[in-house]
Image: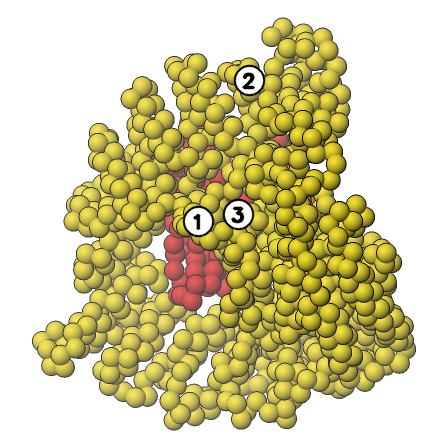
Chain colours: A red, B yellow
Amino acid sequence: MSVLRPFKATDMFKFNNINLDIWTETYGIGFYLNYLSRWPDLCSVQEAPGGRMMGYVIGKAEGSNSEWHGHVTAITVAPEYRRLGLARKMMGLLEMVSDEIYKGFFVDLYVRCANSVAIDMYEGMGYSVYRRVREYYGNIGLGKGGRDEEDAFDMRKPLSRDSRRRSVRSNGRDMIVSAHDVS
Amino acid sequence: MSAALDRQIRPIYDALDTGSNKSAIVSCTKLLKKNPNNVLIKALKALALVRSQKIEESLVLCDEVLESKPTDDAVLSAMMHVLRGLGRHNDMVLMFEEAYKQQPLNEELGAQTFFANVRAGHWKSAQQIATKMHKQFQEDRYLYWSVMSAVLQANDPTTPPAMRTILYKLAHRIITSSPTPYQSNDRFHLHLSILRELELYDDAHKLLDSDIGRAICSTSLSCNEIRRDIWRKRGMILDEGKLATQRILDKHDRNWLEFLSILDATFSYFSSSVESSPSRREGLEQVEKTQELFTRIAEEDGSKDRSAALALLELEKRARNHGISKDSDRLVTLMQDYFTRVGDKACCFEDLKPYLALEENEMTGWTSFLQAVSRSFATPQELQRLINSHKLLRYNLTQSELSVEAETARVTLYIEQYLEGLKLGLNLPSTELQYADDLALLAANTFVTLWGLTSDEKYLLNAVTLLEFALTKSQQSFQARLTLIRLYRLLGAPSLSLEHYRAMGVKQVQNDTLSHFLLSRASTFSLASTGDLTLATECLESTQIYLSNSQEIPEFIIFEERLDNSLQRDIVKMEHLRMRLTHEQITSDVIDMELIELKFIFDRTHHDNRDFEIMSNYQPKISSDVFSQTNLLGKNESHGWLRTFLKVYIQAFQQGSDLDDSVEEKLLIGDRPKQSFGSDSRPPLRQRLAEALSKEELAELTQDELHFIQYARALAEWLEPYHDYTRPPPSVVLAEAAKQTELKTGYPLKGVDLAVLERSSSPSKKDEEPPAVTQSPEQVVRFFETLKERFAESQKNSSPVESLHIATLVQEALLLFIVETLRFKSAAVVKANKFGALVASFKSIRSDAITVLRDISTELVKQSEAVAKAESRKAFVDACAIVIARGIDTDFTLNVAKKVTDARKKVIEGVGKGLERVCSAYAN
C-alpha cells in the first residue's frame, strides 16, 4: 500500500533512503526544480503511510512533430520497497499523462544495455528497444559488462496517438546511433 | 560593436566558462586599454574579479557600469552574475528597472525586470510589473505572473497575517478577470488554491464540478489532491468515499489515499456522540459493506497489491477505536493473514508497526505466531519472513525481556542466522545488497542496547567488527555505514567515520540533510590546531550548496526558505568557526568578519532539515531509537545549542570589535538578509544576547559545555564596560576603513569623511573617567580548575570522547579569552585608561589557563602513545569474543582493531599536540 502523490521540492529533504542507493543519481537542486516547475505532472512520488518515501519518477515532454513524446528521466525505488510493483504504477501515471495531457506519440527511457533485469521489466510493461545509443553512460567501473555498460537502449512504448506504431521496430537492437545524435 | 572586437571578446567568455578567471582578467585589462569606455568589457572584468574574490576592485567597475545605465543584453546578463556574486539583489532590480524604463517596448526586458524583483523577494513590484506587462503585451501569461506574485507575497514568512488575506483577495480578483481560465493544470491549481485559502469552497466546487475540472482532476495528482481537500472542507466526505470506491473498482486505482477516503467516509457516521442515533446504525451497515469491499479486493489482488489487505487492518483498528469491533480476535487474525501474505517483503514490518499496540492476551497469540516462523530457510523469501518475525518480536519486547542475558542470546541468534543467510547471496553481483543484511543491523542495534545496559565498550567493538564484516559482503549497504559512522564517533575514532561518510557519496542537497552524521560537534575531533584541516574543509564543502543555490524559479519559496535558513547550515558554520579559531591567528579582522556573519545568523528563523529517519531502527518501542542512543556525548544539538553558542560568540566578538551598527551599514557590500515578520518589535540585540538561557537551550548542552557557557558569559559581563569605554568612535573607525580600502584599490570609499582621522590622531580624551577596574569574577577564575578536575574524572572512560570534549572546551575558553582581551594588548590603550590592574589580572588568568591546558596536552599525548600498541589491539580482539565465537575471523577482527586503535591514537595525539601549539601561540 502506498500513497501516489506529486513530487514536491521539499521531498529533496527526505529522499535519502532512495538516493543513497548506488544506482540513483543525486542531481543538483536546480535540476529537480527545473523539472518540477516545467513538468510537475510528470513527476510523482510513492510514499508509505508513515511518510517515508518509497520511490519517485521524474519525467519531461520533449521532441518535435512525430517525435513529440514523454521521457522518463529517472525512476527509482528504495531497496526496501522493491518487488512491490511501485515502478509500474509510477510509469503508468507518467504514460497516462503523456498520452492524455501532452498528447505525445510515445514514452521513452534509457537503460544500460547490461541491465537485463530492468530491460525485462520494461518489456513486461510494453516497452521495446527502438535503438542502441553508443557510450551514452559514463563508465562507472563495474567491469565485466564492457560496451554493454556504457551503451544505452532507447526503449519506447507507443501511445494512442501513435496509431501506426512507428515507435516500435523489431530490429531496434541493431539500430545504432552515437550519443551525439540524441538529445 | 565591431566584428573584430566581438571576436576578441569571445575568448573572455570561454575563459569565464571554464573558470580561468585570471586569464579573463588579463584579457579584459588589455582590451580596456584600447577601448577604455566599453561597458561590456568592464562588466566582464567585474565578473572575473568577483569570481576571483577580488571584491573591492570589482566594486569600482561594477559601479561604473551601473552608472552608465546599460540596456544592452550582454552587459545586463554579465552584470546579473556580478551583482548576484556580490549579493546585491536590490541593485540588480534597479538596473533592470532602469533599462526597462528606457526601452518600455522591450518585452524581454520587462520579463527580466519581473524576475529580478522575484529573486530579490520584491513581490509587490513584481506584481505591478506583471500587471503592466499584461496590459501592454496582452499575454495571458503575464496575468498569471501577477496572480502568482500576489500569492508568493502572501506566503512569504515576512508578510503579516492580516496582509495575507488581502493579497489572496487581490489574487482572486485578478484570476477571475482572466478570459481563458485554464490552458494548463498549473493555472487551475493556482485558482483552486486561492479559493481554498479564502474558504470560497462553493466557488471551488463549481470549478471542480465542471467537465474541464473533472478531466483535470482525473489526470493531475496535484489538482486531485486539492480537490480532495476542498471536498472534505465542504463536508463532502461521503461523496469522496463514493468517488474513491469508483476509482478503486473501475479504474483499478490502488492509491492508498483512495482507501483512506473510503475509511474516513465509513467512520464519518460515528462522529455524533449519541449512542443509538440512526446514523450509527447506518454506520454499522457501512462498516460491513466496506469490509466486504476490501475483502473482495484483497482476494482479487492476491500478492499483486497489498493495499486492500492493509486497509482491512486499518478498518479493524478504527472499529476498535470506535468500540464497534465485533470480534476480539480479528485484529490478530488479520495481522497473521497479512504476515502470511506479505511477510516475504521487506516492507512488512513497517506496514504492521501501527497495529502492534496489542492487549496482553492478544500479544501472547501474536508472539507465539511469530515465534513459530521457521528458523530454517532455503530461499531469500523465507529468510525475509524470518527477518520480519525478528523485527516484529523485537519491537514488542518488554523491559524485563531486555536483560543482558536475553539480549546476548538474541544477538548470538541474529549473527548465526546472518552468517547462514549470506550463503543465499553468494552469487549476487557486488552492487547488490545481501538478503541477510538486516540481521547484521538487528545485531548492531542489540549490541547498542547491551552497551547502554552495561556501559561496557566491548559491545560497540563487537558491533563495529560485525558491521565492517557485513560491508565486505554487501559493499553498498549504506545502512551499515550510517551505523558505523555513529559508532566510530562514540568510540573516538572519527577518521573512520569520515571514511565511511565519504564512501556514501553524499552530495548536493544531501549535504544539508546528512552532514550532521559527520559534523555534529565535530570541533571535538578537529585537528585544525595542528594544521590538519580535514574536518574544517568538510565543513566548508558541505556548506557550498547554500552559496551556489540561487535559483531562477519563484514557485519554490518554501523550499528555498528552508534551505537558506537551514539549522544544519549554521550549526556547521559554528563548528567551523570553533575550528578556525584554533588554526588562525586571532586578529581584529577575523573578529569583525565573523561578527557580521554571526549576527545575520542570529536573526534567522531556522528550519531543521536534518534527516534523523534515514538510519533503520530496530529497537523495541519502549526504548529510545538507535539514533538517539548513539548521540555523541549523549546529546543531539539543535536550535537551543546553536542559539547559546551564537550568543557567546556574538557577545565576545561585539566587545572585541570596533564595528558598531552604523559602521557595519556603511561597509556592508551585499544586501542585508530579509528580516522575518515581527523582527522590528524584537528587543535590541544586546538585550537578547544577555537574556538568561532557556530550558530548551540548557537541555541541549553537555555538563561541560554549560561550564564553558557560564564562564564565557561571566567573562563578557565583566569586561563590557572596559570595551565600551575604550572603543573608538564610529566616525574614526569608518575613516580608518576607508583609508585602508584606498591604499588597497586606489579608490576612496564613497561618503566617508577622512578628516576625522587628523582630528583624532592622539588617543581621544574622553569626558568621563574610565570605569574602575574590578576583580575578575569567580566563575572565570575557577573555570580552568573545574574543567581540569572534570578531565581527570573523564580519564576513567574507555572511550576518549569525553576527554577530548573537555580538552577542546578548555582550549576554546582560552581562545575566547584572547578574543576578549585583544583590545587591551596595546600598551597605549592600557596606559591612557589606567587599565594596568585589569591587564595584570588578565595575565594571571591566562597563565593559569595555559598551565591547565599544557597539563591536559601532556596527558593526552602520553595516552596516545599507549592506545595503539599491540596490547590494545589484543584487548580489542579479546573483547570481540561474541562475534569471533560465531565465526568472524580473528585476523579480520585484528585488522579492525588496528584501524580503530590507530584512529584513536591519531585524534588523541593530534588534539593533545594542538593544545600545546595554541598555548605557545598565545603564551605572551
Q: Secondary structure at mark 1?
A: helix
* x and y percentages locating residue B419 in the rendered image: 68, 78
Within 10 Å of disc 3 (Cα), the crowding (few <14, some 14-19, many 20+) is many
Amino acid, disc 1: Ser
Q: Are marks 3 and 1 on the same chain?
A: yes
- Identify the residue position indicated by label 1 in the image: B679
Residue B683 in view: yes
The answer to which of marks 3 and 1 sits earlier in the sequence is 3
Q: Residue at x 62, y 35 (%)?
A: B731
Question: Which numbered disc flags the more N-terminal residue, 2 or 1?
Answer: 2
Q: Position of residue B495 (x, y in %)?
A: 76, 63
- The answer to whether residue B888 is left or right of residue B769 is right
Question: Which quarter of the rendered picture does the C terminus of chain B lie within?
Answer: bottom right
Chain hosting mark 2? B
Circle 1 marks a residue in which chain? B
Q: Position of residue B431 (x, y in %)?
A: 66, 59
Residue B341 placement: quadrant: bottom left
Residue B828 position in % (x across, y down): 79, 45
For disc 2, the marked residue is B67
Q: Quadrant of residue A117?
A: bottom right
Cα separation between marks 2 and 1: 34 Å
Height in image: B177 above or below B805?
A: above
Quarter of the picture containing the N terminus of chain B is top right
Q: Mark 1, residues whose alpha carbon is within 10 Å: few (<14), some, or many (≥20)?
A: few
Kindly identify the residue that appears in the image at 78 percent across and 79 percent down.
B792
Of residues B52 and B440, the one drawn nearer to the viewer in this rendering: B52
Task: Check disc 3 and report the residue beneath it.
Answer: B564
Nearest to the observer: residue B608 or residue B270: B608
Instruction: Using the image, determine if residue B83 lies above or below residue B584.
Output: above
Do callouts 2 and 3 point to residues on the same chain? yes
| Residue at the image point whose x is 32% and y is 88% from the top | B329
